[in-house]
Amino acid sequence: MNAILEIEGLKKYYGRAGNQTKALDGIALQVTDGEFLGIMGSSGSGKSTLLNCIATVIRPTAGKIVMQGEEIQSMKGRKLSEYRGKKIGYLFQNFELLDNLTGRENIMLPMSLHNIPDRESKKRLSRLAGYLEITDVLDKFPSQMSGGQKQRVAAARALIMDPCMILADEPTGALDSRNAKMLMEKLSGLNRDQHATILMVTHDSNAASYCRRILFIQDGRIFHELRRDMPGETQQEFYERILKVMAQLGGGSANVL
Amino acid sequence: MFFELVRRNSRRNRKENGLFFGSLLVSIIAFYIVLSLSQQDVMYFLREMESDAVNRLLEMIPVFYGLTLVILFFLIYFAGKFQMERRRHEFGMYLMMGMRRGRLFAMLLAEDFGGSVIALAIGLPAAVLLSELISLVTARVVGLGIIGHRFSFSPYAVALTAAGFLMIKLAAFLILSIKISREEIGSLLAERPEETKRQFPAAVYAVFLIAGVLGLGTAYYMAIRGISWSRIDRMAFTVVIGFAGTLCLFFGLRAVFGLIIRAGGKDRKLHVFNVRQLQENVIRQSSAMAVSSLLILAALCCFGAGIAMVRHYGDDEHILDYTFTAEYMDEENTSRKKADETMSTLRENGLAHEFSDFIEMKVGSVRTSDDPDDTYSMDVVMNLISAMPATEDRDILLNNLSYMTYPHLIALSSYNELLDAAGRPKIELGEKEAAVYMDTDVSTEALRQMMNEALTKRPETLLDRDPLYLTGEVQTTALVTVRSITLSFALILPDEAFDYYTQGEYNIFVDAILGNREESVSLMTAISEMNAKLNETGLEYESYLQNMGRQLFYTVATSYITIYLAVVFLIVANTVIGVQFLMNQQKTNRRYRTLIRLGAVYETLCRSAGKQINWYFGIPTVIAAVSSIFGVRALFTGILSSRTMGSVSEMMVVSAAMILLLCMIELIYMIVVKRLSSRYLLTLMVPEREE
């Protein structure tokens, strides 16, 4: 298995010397092609910062992020925008659908941004919509959709450009358990059947149990790693192992407030 | 601490809403300029010449002031509302932290007052300077020279400007803050959910669109045909139907956007996003946009019609300085006596040498015939004109000529003297020949051209049953300085023929031209001094300036009022549109952030916003510009007297040019808004930590 994402010595410091917050303090990891990787940690542990660094939303203080052999910090202008649009697909906690666009228009938005002829993408759109069960909401506006439908439309938007990697930032955070389950099943199905590479940040142990591997982050460092024993270990067993680590970490989300 | 917060908030408001602040400045300037009108050089001059009319105009200024107050109140209210909406969350936070509502109110009041004071501090000096500049420029343009230019600072205008400005700001502030202070903290803190307006089926919007076009069309048809101007209730109906038509048109625009999206085909460069943004903005604020469009329309109409009318009043040549015995007399031989008396009085008082030239202008009527209805006939001319292509102008000319059965006569020698003084070649006439004279005030260029064409054929006419051939070109040089004496149609006859037909009984107007004056002495001074001397002699006279004053008064009054109103309307409309757009952009900043995450670069976003601005300003402007062509035409129908109607087409061209010019101003506004929008988008490019 070859790595499509390699991160070395990644640091992100906020503030000036003397009063510095180390959001990321020397992270190193690899994501291989077709992997479903989860990143867990308590609030403020640095997991979202890590995701934002990969998404080029924020610039790291030090370290290297290499996507498919190319260092992303050195990208600029058009190349950077192509990276954001084509190499990665981003799934937000709050869906971030444009509320004045229909489902279809939202999904096609990346195509419009990158001037891609839409014949090919229309085929892809109908396949994705069928798989994600959103065909009948394509012409509705977000305000007319349920939370689950919104997140699945957002997932279709993240996938429409056929990115190398999907970055999901707490995708189940704003969903009820039924919709969360459905979304996770769809994501893991995509990973299993179409070898989609997914990097997911989450608080939710249940959602994390769909992953193959989980990295635990605390105070900006990788603290622990869990791998699901395929095919022997069931999802339930993996879930219980996750809970144990979370308890060791100090309760995870249960202890945030 | 309290005042520090007030100061910071106030500065932030100015920075974030610079467009609004700029408009406040312009409105202060507008207030001051209208209020200080009476201090302008031109007005000082006019008051001496035409005090009644000027006083009547100045009496109307409070009305304009009041009207401006009302219009600008709406501007401040609208823009203030956007600002308040944006700060809802902030207000909620203050209240959550235990700030009393009274204190919040006091803080907002202090902020508002501070902002107003700064606007006045910048705006008033600018207004005084600008008013000074206008005073100088108009005096120059009008040709008065800069004699007696005085610094036109008017404390009265300053006080009223400040009072009016503060009053409308306070009124708008009170209404807005009362609304806000009644809301619960929870609803202030919560992000306001986007109001989802009820959607109707596409057919409903299409019906509104068609109804709008029909309504507007009917209104303009009625106004241009003159139906509306006949009775006040018809006018009211026209205004209502036009207003309703515009509202419907904007409401129905949604159908057009729907069609654009459906027909769109290729979605390149955020095309669908742009159209959806516009659709949302135009729909949510369709009535505000309709009102803005109407304001732009009002501005275009005022400016277009005003300038065209000014030009119409404005072209007047200056040859003669004085006319004595400027009265028309019917008694026999009194005219000759009067003329001689005038000359001797001038000589006795030692004034004759101050004039370089005297012209005895002899004008009379046909005395050889008793039948005033059948003294003169020009059937040949009428036939020649009838043969020309049918136009409205041709019919007017034919109609006018059919009444010219008893023309005035002008002696060739005196007319030639006048031409000589004007530096033009003299005209020569043979026996049985005559030239045609038509005053520019009562004939238009088009009519005279038609007449000239007929004259090239040297048509034969009958004057008291004798043949008389018309030759040369139509003559237009003014015979006297008195504008109230105009000849719509007269014949210039060789002196022998003139003496024969008038039987030696005619009027003599003594025209005089002032002698060379020194460069430094303006015409106004020269004439004023001469007037003083003439008043002592008891002579009756009319000076060029008196008459020009009358003209100038119309010019100044029309141009001032129309341009002033146009500027006020434009400012309000553009500020409302601009502020609305920018506020909406800020309200929907999440969308832009999402686009950035999806890989949109800064240039793409700016281009997208630029396109939206083009459309957002373009729609009301284009609708207003198209409407204004009809609007100006309708104004001409209603305002112009029938004799000036002939030149409507010339005036329409001038209006169209002016409308184009104002559209350029729209362009400038668009560029400013684009800059502001780009600056805002740049701030969005920096990621925000949201957790």
Image: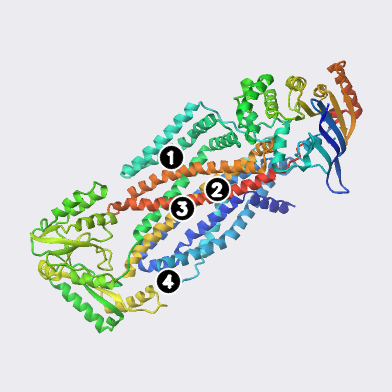
Image x and y of residue B99, in percent? 72, 44
Mark 3 chain: B
Q: Earlier in the sequence, mark 1 or mark 3?
A: 1
* A178 to the left or right of B62: right
* A257 to the left or right of B530: right
* Residue indicated by mark 3: B661
Q: Which mark is residue B670?
A: 2
Q: Which of marks 3 and 2 is nearer the N terminus?
A: 3
Image x and y of residue B521, in percent? 40, 77
| Cα distance in 3D space between marks 2 and 4 | 39 Å
Q: In this view, does B679 lie above or below A130?
A: below
Could you tell me if the residues under marks 1 and 4 are in contact, i.e. CB atoms within 8 Å? Answer: no
| Cα distance in 3D space between marks 1 and 3 | 25 Å
* Residue indicated by mark 4: B145
Q: Earlier in the sequence, mark 2 or mark 4?
A: 4
Q: Residue B243 carries which label?
A: 1
Give amino acid for label 4: Gly
Could you tell me if the residues under marks 2 and 4 are in contact, i.e. CB atoms within 8 Å? Answer: no
Kindly report which numbered mark, 1 or 2, lies closer to the viewer in this rendering: 2
Image x and y of residue B315, in percent? 34, 62
Could you tell me if the residues under marks 1 and 3 are in contact, i.e. CB atoms within 8 Å? Answer: no
Q: Which mark is residue A37?
A: none
- Which residue corresponds to the image point at 51% horizontal and 43% vertical from the top-left? B618
| Cα distance in 3D space between marks 3 and 2 | 15 Å
Quarter of the image for residue B613 reads top right
